[in-house]
Amino acid sequence: MLTKAPRGTKDILPDEINKWQFLESEFRKICDIFGYKEIRTPTFEHTELFLRGVGETTDIVEKEMYTFNDKSGRSLTLKPEGTAACARALIEHKLYNQSLPLKLYYIIPGFRYERPQAGRLREFHQFGVEVFGSDNAAVDVEVIGLAMMFLKGLGLEDLDLRINTLGCSKCRGNYREALKNYFSFKRESLCDTCRARLERNPLRILDCKNDNCKQILGESPKILDFLCDECKDHFEKVKRLLYSLKIDFAVDPMIVRGLDYYTKTVFEIISKDLGAQNTICGGGRYDGLVEECGGPHIPAAGFGMGIERLINVLENRGLLNLPQKGVDVFLAVLDDESFETAYKLLFELRGKGLSAEIDYMNRSLKGQMKYADKLKAKFAIFVGEEEIKNNFLTVKDLSNGEQRKLSDKDLFEFLFNNIRKGCC
């Protein structure tokens, strides 16, 4: 137990961290282009936030949350998603008093007690964006457009964008009753969970993964037949703007997402490389969430994107073969007496912004050079008794084997010109 990570969690090792850092950097770049600012919220929140925001009848709340009491008896939950926490921060700090819309992004760990499988872990990581303050359908499309531009910028072209609308509270009420009537005649064929949902929230049945329940869904009422005029207009504008941006999509009336706060637009971006867990990004509009969490009426839209799933897709398509970064300089020590001089130079190089390494394992010169090769060092500097006595250092370009002797004065200028200016 002490030497094995908990089930559903994964170490991100040094050999693969460059993939994460690359994707995080690219996500920050696209968010900056779109005018989004980063927000960082706590890893855990008061449980009530998710009960009210995510919804008590969702799978997340009913089955998947990591909830515990602290030493004062308060119920806390490791956050299973990022949107509710952003809504809480908006309310607590009155961010709605700033110039709207407020456009935020985050990179977070999330926690859900699920059966681990490809693309699904109990501790997972997410990119996300949220836009607070506008009910304009153009915001829905901006959120979708940001996600699609980010993914296409990584080389993913053949993704399926599926959209739907869940309407507002008014038209969804009529739809809820139609679903209730439909499923009541098929009650015995529903799973135990969906039988309980039938009275409390029949819309959640549409999100059930049970095979029997999914078979029943085929002839169930569709929300598109129950939309009020305002919701119809909103959805038509979303589709029209997607057409104008040449973003391909399909309308899928079975998309409801797994959280209760969604209203009007919902969407998923699907990858065929992920098997059963094939949604790489999902989101939509949630105009009632801030109010449900105790704030004023603030319309909003956003998405969450699973980083582990994204990495899986990119690796499967050979789009994440990043070169390992090497060090600029390796200091090869020729004798024990020269180590302190080399060690001092090591920190001088680092102080000037060059990455530098030295051997701490008492290797032979041959062993040191093998180590330098493993570190992908660009240059090696040899430090020994003769070099110290005669005030010069031997520098070797490890890409072509060329060597030269340089004075202390010329060393830094040479390294700077050949490493920092890329003139090797």
Image: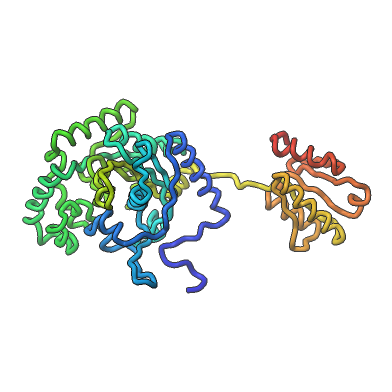
Image quarter of residue 97: top left
Q: Position of residue 204 (x, y in %)?
A: 20, 54
Name the foreground residue: 147 vs 79: 79
Examine the rendered structure and indicate whether residue 410 appears above or below residue 343: above
Q: Position of residue 288 (x, y in %)?
A: 24, 46
Residue farthest to the top? 244
Question: Which corner quadrant holds the C terminus?
Answer: top right
Residue 231 in view here: yes
Residue at (72, 34) in percent of width and height: 423
Residue at (93, 51) in percent of width and height: 389
Horizontal relation, residue 158 to residue 26: left or right = left
Name the foreground residue: 188 vs 199: 199
Residue at (74, 61) in percent of width and height: 360
Image quarter of residue 413: top right
Horizontal relation, residue 369 to residue 83: left or right = right
Q: Position of residue 173 (x, y in %)?
A: 12, 47
Q: How many marks?
A: 0
Residue farthest to the right? 390
Q: Position of residue 339 (x, y in %)?
A: 82, 58
Residue 274 in view here: no
Horizontal relation, residue 42 to residue 25: left or right = left
Specify how the rendered protein is coloured. rainbow
Horizontal relation, residue 278 to residue 229: left or right = right
Residue at (15, 58) in percent of width and height: 200
